[in-house]
Image: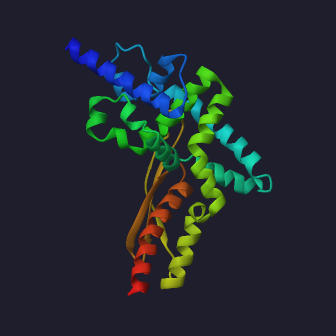
Amino acid sequence: MSAKIDESLRFEQVLYEELEARLEISFQDKTLLHSALTHPSYANEHPEDPIEDNERLEFLGDSVLSMLVARSLYQRFPDVNEGRLTEWRSHLVCGPTLSKIATQIKLGPALRLGRGEERTGGRDREGNLERAYEALIGALYLDQGLECVNGIIEKTLIPEFELLIQGETMLNPKGELQELVMEKMNIRPEYVLSQKSGPDKNNRHEYVVEVFVSGELLGSGIGSTKQQAEKYAASRALEILSLRFYEKDSC
């Protein structure tokens, strides 16, 4: 048993070192990094482990991330008004965006998960990845300060900033979907709130919205607000309908 534990710890250490190398950082306090990657399910199953779970770091990282993204948007887009900047920030710090970035920097394999969470696909779960990224930001802020964190945010969010410049279809999927459906079918999409849960420990709610077109379910979305969930549902419906109408027009 001891040999297995030692092997597991060595494997974890390799994953942490690889993550630091990818981000070109080196934590001075390694326990902060370990904590950022520790899911509550792991802490519950290992009460003897002195490393706390990542919920408190997530809380901190969420605030740091929001502030630094707001500052970066303010500096990058001097001619954009407050309403648009707020919309852009919401997109950049939302769950799907952060989980995508977490996947790109390979946070999933480095997560410390409980057995049940591991068995049910916890390494790929959007919420786990989003929270781990926020916790990583919080840990790095405590370890090395604001400007170091800003460098990581700039590095990992650059592709998303570029998408903001290239076009805004992704930022207004509801408008795009309605325009497409009205043009092709002369009807309006219908949004249905199918589930609401929360608040969680960070006072967040979770909404699940489904979008129907002519009675057909074309997409669902999850968000911390009903409006956010509707946008994600519309994005999925757009992908389906755009392909469907393209294939039809090509025939």
Q: Position of residue 186 (x, y in %)?
A: 51, 85
Q: Position of residue 173 (x, y in %)?
A: 55, 65
Between 201 and 135, the one lying in front of the other is: 135
Above or below 91: residue 174: below
Classify the position of the C terminus by image quarter: bottom left
- Residue at position x 67%, y 38% in the image: 68
Classify the position of the N terminus by image quarter: top left
Q: How many marks?
A: 0
Residue, far right: 79
- Residue at position x 28%, y 15% in the image: 6
Taking 115 as reference, is 108 left or right? right
- Residue at position x 38%, y 43% in the image: 125
Kindly indicate the quadrant of the structure image that contains residue 45.
top left
Above or below 152: residue 214: below
Residue, far bottom: 251
Kindly indicate the quadrant of the structure image that contains residue 11.
top left
Does residue 38 show up? no
Above or below 218: residue 209: above
Residue, far left: 1
Does residue 73 show up? yes
